[in-house]
Amino acid sequence: MLFFVRKLSNDLLEDEFKEVKDRTEKLMFPPLGFSKVTITCDGWTNIQGRPIVNFLIVNKYGEMYHSSVDCSGIYKDALWESGELIKVIEELRPENVLQFVAENAAVNRKAGELIREKYPHIVFGGCVAHGLNLLSHDLGQYTWITSLFDRCQKMVAFIKNHHMTNAIFIDKFSDGLTLLRPGATRFMTNFIMIDRAYALRYCLKEMTSSKEWEKYEGGITDWTAKGKCMDTRLTIEDKNFWDEIHDLLWLIHPIWVLLRKVDSHRHFIGHIYWESWNLEDILKKMHTNVKLKSRLLTQEQCELISVNAHARWEMWNNELHPTAMLLMPFYFTKPSVLPYLQIEHVKQSFRRYVRIYGTHVLKKQLDEIEEWYIVYSDGIPAMRDLAMQILGQSVTSSACERNWSSFPHIHNKKRNRLTVERVDKLVYVAFNKNISSIHRKLERQGAKTLNKYLRSRGKQQKIRRFVDEHEEPTKFGCDLSKWLDDQAEDNEVRGRTEAPAFAGETSEPHTDQSQERQRPKKFVDDIDDDDLCSEEGDAESEDDCLIDVLLQERVRFDNGSASVRPGHNERLVTVEDIAYDETISISLPKVEVEEAVSKLQNTAV
């Protein structure tokens, strides 16, 4: 009987494994999609003490668990690791693999070099999240930072280790929010502990000055415990201690923000080169921050920290990062070529465009830059294909870190007799089922996946042909990659000295409240060719339709800054902000200036 139960269990697992594998591969490698992938790997020790190395596949469609290898009794050098990677690459086919990402260990880098010798098109990239965590460890070389860690850790340990102090703090002063201890497997765990303590500093001060604390401290008879209690109270009441923590949090904040961006499901490869350079520049000038309360952070220390940041940057940088940045229209823009007299006519045409297409077009079509290339780059197919292959890659091995949580869920103390091969299949089924569930959830929410874009490209090509018939092509065809407007130039034309405020930031209303806002009437998939013109009547000419089509949905507001580097003091403006706010200007795509201005003048009433 037991034999048949085991056989049935094996057969059911094998059938489920094959079904999940077929479904997952269809989602990760669609027949009409761009299926270049990144291979990530990481090491771990299971409940039996066996060293396990897992391999995952990452692209714009999600994260797929591929396999795991038991390397017990094996010397894990670069030659062995490259051999295992070659097996995975051959199974996926070398033309589908673009990058190999792992932690910044020397053995991983050497394995990447061996892979590059066999497959010249596959590059190695260090894990950005791991590199930023190492950069935070580099800050421990300063004595004042180490002293802050020790004092804060002793304070947190005393409060949480004694049930009386912990109960007083949580029940009466912190509203249930507790202090955090350092964790062994978390990035920048000491800074997380300090950040939580700084957020609760007023609650801690209120606790040490309360009658409950005085009663507890007075009742301690052990001199060792009494000394720790006094040290904790003096630390909490020390103003210089909190000022130094304030400065340390300002120092670590740009590193923490970048770590939060890369350690997620978001594809960040198009921004990592700029963000890495910007991080080094911010750390170098941190001593000039006027919000610093102490003077412990000197210019020499900031320069040394900047050098460390540059060294860590070189650990994770590769050829794909600057290439991905060059493919991001966000970083390469020009000021508007339209004078102020024509902007009002552009706004009127844009409002007609909004009434047809709606706000959801802006939000959904521009969620991912890869989707932007699918919609707007018919004139440059070679660049579109290159962008789709590169911009969906990963810059971290965080997918492997997240995958480790599936192993103890399956191979635990109660099921500790499972073989490595059986655990591998169980983890494959459990982890890769999430991809199907996520895709189904996105479909229910109405998110536009790649297949929907491919089905709607016939309509987009109609628009592109309509545009090409009415304008002289540029060097790359109809170049729609320049959509940012320089608000500083607009302010100069209007005679302003500062940037206008957004809706909701001023006391005066920015629109006439007596007029009810008109909401979008149609979805983009429901629009016919006749709907490209405005719904106001037959008085609209083809030039009006042309302006409606040429106007871009995405607008950025520069807050009056003429900075060459985009990204500072900017935020995304919604369609409703543009349609109903007279203080926001927009820009046309790059066409011949004289032709665009003449068309706009012809539409003037």
Image: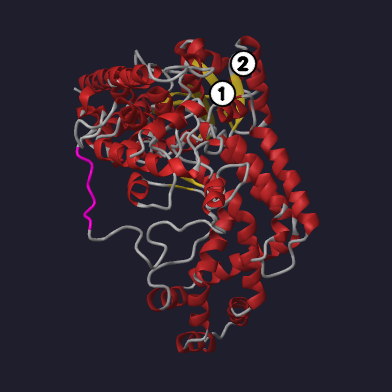
Name the amino acid, label 2. Ile
Q: Residue at x 64, y 78 (%)?
A: 238
| Residue in view at x 50 percent, y 37 percent | 398
Q: Is residue 247 above or below residue 45?
A: below
Q: Badge 2: how crowded within 10 Å, few (<14), some, or many (20+)? A: many
Check if residue 518 falls in the magenta segment.
yes
| Residue 448 in the image, given as x and y percentages of width and height | 30, 30
Few, some or many residues within 10 Å of mark 1 (<14, 14–19, 20+) = many
Left/right of residue 339 with respect to residue 316 in the rendered view: left
What secondary structure is the stretch in magenta mostly built from?
loop
The residue lying toward the viewer, choosing from 154 and 111, is 111
In the rendered view, would you say 383 is above or below 223? above
Magenta segment boundaries in residue numbering: 515-521
Evaluate whether residue 60 shows in this view.
no
Residue tagged 1: 100
Q: Are marks 2 and 1 in contact (CB under 8 Å)?
A: yes
Question: Which residue is more in the foreground, 551 or 521?
Answer: 551
Q: Which mark is residue 45?
A: none
Q: Where residue 510 appears, x then y in whole percent?
A: 36, 59
Which residue is the site of mark 2? 115
